[in-house]
Amino acid sequence: MWARNFPSPVVPSSWVPAWFPRASCAAELGRHKLEKGIPSLQEALKDESKEVRRAVVLALMEFQSEKTIESFREALLDKDLEVRMYAEEALKMAEAKGMR
């Protein structure tokens, strides 16, 4: 009970960027291929943080599903170059697997 009053000994919360928890959640959804998370990931493509949007595209790539193709097409229009590059690579991979 006394431990609640002390900050984490590992990482002070002031060192964690505001976008980090959202990007981490996106990465975990992709890593575990939780299909129920696809709509949340697709919505997160609109996040204000480029780091989150990058993590989302990489997470969606893990699914290798036709459900994600339209999201990659939308990500091609993102203002961040890395998001667009990841989306382009995802579409190339999908095309190689016969998905359109």
Image (tube, rainbow, N blue to C red):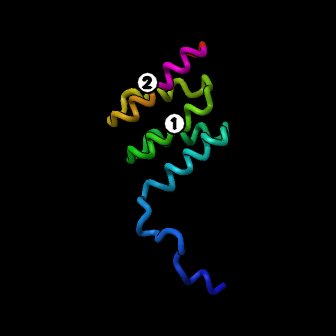
Q: Which comes before the other along the chain, label 2 or label 1?
A: 1
Q: Which residues are magenta?
A: 88-97
Disc 2 from disc 1: Cα separation = 11 Å
Q: Residue at x 44, y 31 (%)?
A: 86
Q: Secondary structure at mark 1?
A: helix
How many numbered circles are shown? 2
Check disc 2 and report the residue beneath it: 88
Quadrant position of residue 14: bottom left
Q: Residue 11 placed where, x, y %?
A: 49, 68
Residue neighbourhood size for the residue with mark 1, other residues' Cα within 10 Å, grouped as few (<14), some (14–19), many (≥20)? many
92 above or below 52?
A: above
Q: Residue 68 placed where, x, y %?
A: 56, 28
The amino acid type, in three-letter code, at marker 2 is Glu
Q: Secondary structure at mark 2?
A: helix
Is 92 covered by the magenta stretch? yes
Quadrant position of residue 66: top right
Residue neighbourhood size for the residue with mark 2, other residues' Cα within 10 Å, grouped as few (<14), some (14–19), many (≥20)? some
Quadrant of the drawing holding the C terminus:
top right
Q: Residue at x 55, y 45 (%)?
A: 26
Give the main secondary structure of the magenta stretch: helix
Task: Determine the residue located farthest toward the bottom in the rendered image.
Answer: 2
Quadrant of the drawing holding the N terminus:
bottom right
What number is the disc on residue 25?
none
Q: Residue 90 placed where, x, y %?
A: 50, 25
Q: Residue at x 67, y 36 (%)?
A: 35
The amino acid type, in three-letter code, at marker 1 is Leu
Is 24 covered by the magenta stretch? no
What number is the disc on residue 58?
1
Q: Residue at x 38, y 35 (%)?
A: 82
**Which sits in the foreground, 44 or 50?**
50
